[in-house]
Structures are given as structure tokens and as C-alpha cells.
Image (cartoon, rainbow, N blue to C red):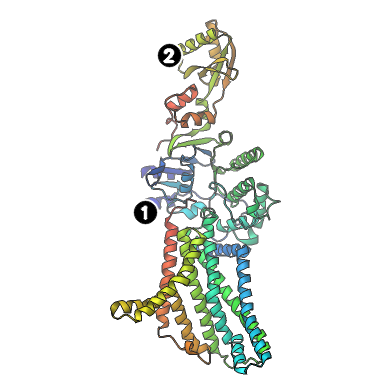
Amino acid sequence: MADDISYQDNENIVISTSRLTKAFGKLVAVNDLHLQVMRGDVFGFLGPNGSGKTTTIRMLLGLIRPTAGRAIIFGMDNSYQLPAILLRIGAIVETPVFYPYLSGKDNLHAVAAASGMRSGSASNRRVEEVLEIVELGKQAKDAFRNYSLGMKQRLGIGAALLADPELVLLDEPTNGLDPAGQYEIRQLIQRLSNLGKTIFISSHFLHDIQQVCNRVAILQKGNLIKQGEVNELLQQGEQIIVRLNTIGDTEQALTLLQQAREQGLPWIEQANMDTNKQNIPIIRVGAPRTRSAEINALLARHNLFAAEIRPQEGSLEDLFLGLTAPSASISTPRPGMAALARDSHDLQIEE
Amino acid sequence: MKASQHMAVESSTPPSSRASSVLMGRQDYISAILRLTGMELYKIRRRLMSKVLSFISVLSVLSIFGLLALAAFLMAKDGTPSDAILRFSEALRLPGSLSLIVQLLLTLGQILVIILVSTIVGGEYTDKTVRLMLTRGPSRTQFLLSKIGASTVCIMLGVVGIVLLGIFTGLLLNFTTGIVPTFDFFSASWLGHSVLYLLITMLGLLTYAMMALFLSTLGRATAAGLAGVLTWSFLIEPVIGVVGLFGRSISGPLGSFFQSLPDYLIGSNISVLLQNQDSYIFPTPSAQQVPSQSSDIHALLVLLAYLVVFIGIALWVNKRRDVLI
């Protein structure tokens, strides 16, 4: 209980879950989840299909009751004060659903009434504004049933933004959108973030998440396996690619780097042999990008001259695959990912 | 748990201001229900289904009175004795037309109301829009109460509209019989009992509507409410009525039990309430217009019990269960 009190005392915590669990019979969809989303965060919520992302979002929105644990949103327990919480949230859960026989505009009016806004013409201006934001002004009077998937998605985002909420929960918001649409949504999220909104976004599009989110959490089989700042996570996944001219030199360099790691260069996480796209042998060194020059100097001192030394950024995709692949804990061919998998709980926010 | 709830209230973060174009309405419990009810009525108005149902209602009224007028006209043309024409004329003008319209409302009107209510409740599950509405702020109870409110408004408007249409159509077509309508029956007392007669009709429709709401909520589908109530009102209630008659031929407690079953059906209790008003509204009571042996209080309590059970269980189920669609 003391944990709960500390969550609530911090005004900057928008969402905090404590031991949140949902079981459907014997299937545990979400297990003992501790999440913290801070005010102003663009929080990415990642996980393979069936990992419990949507179940978590449904629990946060009160659509399903947790089997155990609790969710505190804006300092209020969503088991008791859900209506007050929901008035401050805009959300899309899975594919946006609306009344098929109503136009996009009429659907937004219906949402406005349900969101506690003044009904009828009083909310006209805001509805028009939102339709322009999501670029559905021209199709505003068309029946929702005639909308394309992309248009439905945009209307869903419009509905989520309608009451100008403090917290926006978006479950797969770029589903069904073409690359231009996905780009627009990323821009929109950035704009909302700049306005101080807190955004909680679940997506399979890791590239999108990496570009827009400052913090992420990764779920697998209902368990939280990673949570932290995107920058920190990506730093851990950084690598330096080293290519030498001959296979002999490459093998020698690999031995040298491995020895250096064992003999006192702790910033070298791992060094492994691999091949590039042209099937030429390379060495992947798990080390911060800023250490490229030191690696070059080390090799040169032993008369090994690199033909190419290229720092490579870590990516969420690598991190995600490294953590969620079935064999991630057994075989980790990517040094950066191996390091991440090893200390995967280091960045979890403790209670 | 209460202590932690109290703490959560105390430490909730204050809401930030919204954009100037976002005009929030009153947030008290009743205002939220009224706003949602208005939204439900707006949705009903925009549905093709409600237009079709309205068209069927109007067409039915016009057809029935049209057929009566046509029959009276043909009889007058054939030189049929005036007694037969008089009976048709009585059905076309007040107060006889009121009985005809109410019978229409309690048969065809009942089916249309069941379709409407099953659709507005079950449709939320079929279209998955329950997910949309329940993540916007209203509580689940408010959400369902707004459906009840919208259903009640539709029933009231429908009954008043159809009754007025029927009365005026009947009066207009009565001229084909050549019998001049009189309003000798009209008095304040007659008007009061007629209003009561219509309120009973509305109560009857509302009871079946709430059964549709309950079954649609329980089955999470339009079909559940529709099939359930139609089966109940047009199959199970008549069967129980027959069982009641069968009970008369059996002596002992079992026979008494069977005989008493029809006294607890929705349809028979609405009939009791209507029958008890007949003698005040219709100046020459027929055999069926003799007051019922059952009391109004009994009938009202039975109908009230049905309403409490249907609405209560629907609210409880709606509040308790997970929305997984």
C-alpha cells in the first residue's frame, strides 16, 4: 500500500499500475504489471501479438476488470473513479469503431455528447476543427460504413482528440494507413507532445515508436520484460562494425578485441564475427559509438588496419527482436542485444 | 480498500485546461444521462430502421381504417342494413377507434418497439460501439439508463403519434359511412380515463421493451432481444394461458397453481388494466368490456416486478462484465 501512496504523491505520474494482472481462466493475459507513465511522455507500448498490450489498455480504460492489482491514473484509482478519469482521456482501442449509419461528423457529435461536451451545435466548431486536423473535412458527411480503413483510423484519432484530453491512449493508430498517413500520424503525435499531452501508444511499427517515443515498455506473454528511456535502450544496442581486408586480419582482430575485453576494456560488451550483405567477414563489436577511434587505434597498434569502421545505432527493432525472439535467452548472435538480454531488468522502474 | 480510495481522491492531479473550442456541458449525473439520451434519440432518428418502422406503423393505421371505411362504403352501396354499417362507423370514430388503435399498438406496435429496442441495445455490441461509448466518460449505468430513457421517449411519442393519426384518420374516413360523429361521450372524466388507457398501453410496451433491453444486454446481440421477446410474448405467454385453462380441469393445489399462472404474465396484466378502464371509456360495454376480476394494484405490482427484474439484471450484468469485443 505504501507503494500506491508514493505513486499518487507524484503529480508528474500520469499512469501507474501496481501488480496489474488479468487472467482469463487459466490463461494469464497480463501478469503483475508495473508501469509508470510520466506527464508529457510519449510512451511506446510494445509486444508481439497476444502479449497483453490491448488487455492492459482495456484495463486502464475500465473495459475489463483486473484479476489483481490496480491502475492509478491522474492520481485516481480507475476501479472507483473511472468516469472522472475517462473525461481526461482520449483513446482508440484496436480498430476504431463508430456507428456505421452515421456520418463521420455525426459520429463525432455522438462522441462529443458521450465525452461530456455540450451537445448539438455548441460542439460544432470543435468537431469541424478535429475533422480538419485529421483531414476528413471533405468526407465529413459520408456515412462511416463507406470509409476506408485509413479514414476510419483517422476518424478514431479525431474522436480521441475531440475533447482535448490530457492523456491520449492509442492502440495501433497507424494500422491501415499508407506511409504518408503513418508520417502524418507521427507528426500529429509530435505536435500533441509539444502541446504537453501525455501519449501512450501501442504499435507494431517499431520504426514509428522509435521516432516518436521517449520511453517504452516491452511486454511478452503478459510479462513486462523491459521499460525505460528509448535513448538509454538504444545506447545499449549500439555496435561498431569493423571490416578488414583479409580473413586472416579479421580473425586476428577478433582475437585481439576479445582479449582486450577480458583484460580491462569493459566498454567492449562483446565481439563477434559476422558477414555483411556482400558476404564479406566483419566484426560486430558491442560498444558505444563514441569508441570507434579507440578501436581503430587499438588495431593499428598491432599492425591491423581497418578498411572500414562504422558505428551503428541500436534500433528498437533489434532490441524488440532480441528480447522477444523465442531463442533470445539462449543464442544471442548480436552482441548489443546479448548485453540487453542479459540485464533486461536493469531499467525497470522499481516500486 | 476504502482508505486507499480516499487517498486517491485527495491526491488526484488537477485537470489541465482544454482548448477554447471545447465546450464542456454540465457533468452532474442526471445531466450526463439527459445528454446521452438526447444522443440516443439523435442516433435513432438518423437510422434507416426507425424510418422503416415509422412507415410501417403509419401504413398499418391507414390500412386498417381504410379497409374499415371501404367495407362500410361497399355495404352502404349494396344496401346492407344500417346496423352493420353503424358497427363499422363506431370502429372508425371515437371512442371505438381508440380501442382499435390500442389493439394495433399492443400487437404490431409491440413488435416494432421490440425491434427498435433490441437494435439500439444489441446494435452497440454487434457494431462494437459499446467500446467507443464506455471509454468516453459515462458510467455503464448511465449508458444503459440513457437507452431506457430513449426507449421510453420513443414509446411515448410513438403511442401519442399513432393514436392521433388513428383518431383523425378514422374521423375522416367515417364520412364514407354517412353517419355523423357525435361527441356525447366526451367529458373530463372520459378524457382522464382515456389518458390512463394510453398510459397503460405505454406501460405494456415499455415492459416488453425492457425485456428486449435485458435480453439484448444479456446476449450481447440484437437477435437475442428480438427472438427472446417475440418467443416469450407470442409463444410462451399463450402456452401458459392454455396451461391456466388446463388447470381448471385439475383439482387440488396443482390445478390452482396452473390456474394462477396467467395472472402473472405481462400480457394478461396489461389486459386487466385496460379492461378495468373499458367501462369508463366505452359507453356501451361489450362482454369483453366488463371490468376484470383482478385488481389494478395486482396488475401494476406484477408489471413493476417485471420492470425491476429486467432493468435490475440488465444494469447488474452490464456493470459487472468485461467488454472484450
The residue at the point 49 percent across, 22 percent down is A334
- Residue A122 position within the rendered picture, expressed as x and y whole percent measured from the top left: 64, 60
What kind of residue is marked 2? Glu
Above or below, A302 relative to B263: above
The chain to which mark 2 is attached is: A
Closest to the observer, B1 or A61: A61
The answer to which image quadrant residue B47 occupies is bottom right
Residue A161 in the image: x percent, y percent? 59, 49
A177 in relation to B167, above or below = above
In the foreground, B133 or B182: B182
In this rendering, the answer to whether B219 lies above or below A308 is below
Q: Is residue B210 visible?
A: no
Are circles 2 and 1 on residues that touch, CB within 8 Å? no
- Report in which chain the residue with disc 1 lies: B
Give above or below for B54 relative to A68.
below
- Give how far across and how far down residue B102 sits, in percent: 54, 80
Q: Which mark is residue B2?
A: 1
In what element is the residue under mark 1? Answer: helix
Which residue lies under the disc numbered 2?
A262
> Residue furthest toward the front?
B78
Q: CA distance from mark 2 to mark 1?
A: 57 Å
Which secondary structure lies at badge 2? helix
Residue A142 circle label: none
Q: Nearer the viewer, mark 2 or mark 1?
A: 2
- Furthest-top residue in view? A303
Q: Amino acid at mark 1?
A: Lys
Pointer 1: residues within 10 angstroms few (<14), some, or many (20+)? few
Confirm whether circles 2 and 1 share one chain: no
Horizontal placement of B154 versus B78: left or right? Answer: left
Q: Quadrant of the N terminus of chain A?
A: top left
What x and y, as percent, mark residue B20? 63, 53
In this orientation, which residue lies closer to the viewer: A190 or B206? B206
